[in-house]
Amino acid sequence: MVNLESLDLSQNNLTGEIPTSLISLSHLKYFNVSFNHLHGKIPENGSFLNFTIESFMSNEGFCGGPAHLRLLPCPNNSPQASRRKRFPRFAYILLPTALTVFAVIIFELVLIMAQRRSRNHAQTNPLPPTAHERISYYDLVHATNDFGESNMIAKGSYGSVYKGVLRDGSILAIKVFNLQVEGAFKSFDSECEVLRNIRHRNLVKVIGSCSNLDFRALVLEYLPNGSLERWLYSHNYFLDFRQRLNIVIDVATALDYLHHGYSSPIVHCDLKPSNVLLDQDMTGHVGDFGIAKLLSGGESKAMTNTLATIGYIAPEYGSEGKVSRKCDVYSFGILLMETFSRKKPTDEMFTEDCGLKDWVRHLLQNPELDLVDHNLITPPDENSTTIVQCIFKIMEMAVTCTVKSPEERIDIKDALNELKNIKVQFLSKLSHQKAKLKTKLPSSNVDSGMELADRLRLIRCLEEGKLQCVTISYLCSMVSFPVIAFPRLNYSSSCVM
């Protein structure tokens, strides 16, 4: 028994406390008692120094343990302490007998678990508080065609993400960590620690985790529209101004929750367009918490040796390893600049002396259209001026997010409120334009030949910032409706909705 290397007792309805005698198992590398009914103090020495919080999750109430588990300290009047004071001789007499009985029980349980594992290599452990169907490792293999290239939808520093289709038709995203890469174990543990309790509509939902000695994976909700990066730079995709504004508001809302809406502030540390995923309604979800930091005990800063993505990383984070909520604010400012200019911070046009934020700051001094992604205002229409004005306001705020001093950067809550105000102003002006158009449209009594559907279609174009679109059926049937009323309209053969 002293040479035992792996002990998995998870999901066995065990009760009581973890015996301190397990400290003597010096060769124990893997230990898991999650999803039981255990309580009491977690041993602080021996192999327990290497186990993560995942090994103990979903029990009735642990305390103490190694410092990295961040559990509450055990009270001095705990039952185990009072028993040691009251019955020291009794404990010494029964200890050898208890150890022998426990060793026999452990041996039997190991045999049972070994037989179970041979049938089911690795079980998916749902992250509390929600319960999900258990998915085996072999189900994940089948769902992803043996983690085939055709199912791969993303690849990052610590692993790859695959699209998986279960036998019941459910679609999931499976993030498999490459354990050969240094830091992959730590990245997996970090995501489990951060995501095990948080829930928000603008965060990627984690359904469960699947792990054993040589495999680590997170099972995530599948978001069909991919990443913001994909929509910004792929020729087959396009986001209009309103969609981009809604997405960055979603991202700011997620950061506001992480920074202020949870008991311990969470710093994402790696915010960028590839980590913003879009669902079927184009709602933004922040994902990839592999290097996220949980600030506990009232601390506002932490230190780390893990570097984020070049171009998005705050100066104090990159040079000194200092992590705070203002690091996310900096990254968010860069994301804003990139989203509305469609220029990456790593673009060849930028140098060490003049990066994206310097370029934006310079162009704002004498506002130029080069600051704006031309796809948003080409061809020009009645809303182009409004869009440009709104983007300039967004860029000005992005500059305040990326100042060198963390103390001088605005809070994400203030950034979120400013973006919401810009959206209100944009929609207000859009509504005004719509009202003007309605007064110019021919009434139903005028024999213009214009179909009601075409009129509604034209109004809808205006609402979506596409005033330049007019259908051919409208153009061909127009008799008495004066074209001069809309001198800037581009009469085209289609109107993309």
Image: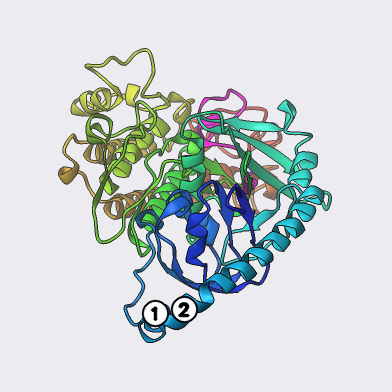
Residue at image position (38%, 86%) is: 86
Q: In the drawing, does residue 44 fall left or right of residue 8?
A: left
Residue at image position (56%, 33%) is: 179
Can residue 286 be seen in the rendering of this structure?
no
Local SS, label 1: helix
Q: In the drawing, does residue 243 fall left or right of residue 296?
A: right
Q: Quadrant of the N terminus?
A: bottom right
The tag on residue 91 is: 2
Q: Depth-wise, is mark 2 or mark 1 nearer the camera?
A: 2
Can residue 457 be seen in the rendering of this structure?
yes
Evaluate if marks 2 and 1 touch, with contact meaning CB atoms under 8 Å apart: yes
> Residue 471 at x, y = what percent?
66, 34
Residue at image position (47%, 65%) is: 20
Q: Dot 2: few (<14), some (14–19), or many (≥20) neighbours within 10 Å?
A: few
Q: Which residue is mark 1?
A: 84
> Residue 101 at x, y = what percent?
64, 70
| Residue at far bottom of view | 86
Q: Mark 2 belongs to which amino acid?
A: Ala
The tag on residue 25 is: none
**Quadrant of residue 295 in the image?**
bottom left
Local SS, label 2: helix
Q: Nearer the viewer, residue 287 or 22?
A: 22
> Residue 338 at x, y = what percent?
39, 30
Residue 273 painted magenta: no
Q: Which region of the structure is painted magenta?
A: 218-239
Eyeballing the image, is 42 above or below 414?
below
Q: Dot 1: few (<14), some (14–19), or many (≥20) neighbours within 10 Å?
A: few
